[in-house]
Amino acid sequence: MESKFTGSLLELIAVSMFAGVVSAFSFGLLVPWAICYYYRYMADHT
């Protein structure tokens, strides 16, 4: 089975930066949420 990424590079960068900023501003308290947000995006677009 072949898997392809269907999102755009700009979206991937934005999602990664958003997850990082949320983690930084919450002093690490929202790291689990940010990781799930990133992996949910990746799962939806592959």
Image (spheres, rainbow, N blue to C red):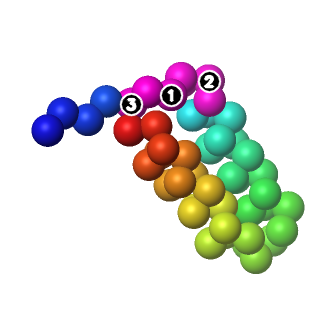
In the shown orientation, is residue 10 left or right of residue 25? left
Precedes in sequence: disc 2 or disc 3: 3
Please name the residue that numbered disc 1 is placed on.
7
Q: What amino acid is labelled 2 in the image?
A: Leu
Q: Are marks 3 and 1 in contact (CB under 8 Å)?
A: yes
Q: Magenta stretch: residue 24 in it? A: no
Give the camera-side residue of 4 and 15.
4
For disc 3, the marked residue is: 5
Label 3: which secondary element: loop
Instruction: Please give the label number shown on residue 34.
Output: none
The total of numbered circles placed on residues is 3
- Residue at the spot 53% in from the left edge and 54% down from the top edge: 40
Measured Cα–Cα span from mark 2 to mark 1 = 8 Å
> Above or below — where is 7 with respect to 38?
above
Say which of marks 2 and 3 sits in front. Answer: 3
Q: Which mark is residue 10?
A: 2
Q: Is residue 42 above or below residue 31?
A: above
Q: Residue furthest left?
A: 1
Say which quarter of the image contains residue 5: top left
The percent position of residue 9, horizontal first and vertical second, equals 54, 24
Taking the spot 50% from the left edge, 28% from the top edge, the residue there is: 7
Looking at the rendered structure, the kind of residue marked 1 is Gly
Most extreme residue toward the bottom, as rendered? 29
Q: What is the span of residues highlighted in magenta in the rendered image?
A: 5-11
Q: Is residue 38 above or below residue 3?
A: below
Q: To which quarter of the image does residue 27 belong?
A: bottom right
- C-alpha span from label 3 to label 1: 6 Å
Q: Residue at x 31, y 30 (%)?
A: 4
Q: Residue at x 70, y 52 (%)?
A: 20
Percent position of residue 23, x then y: 74, 62
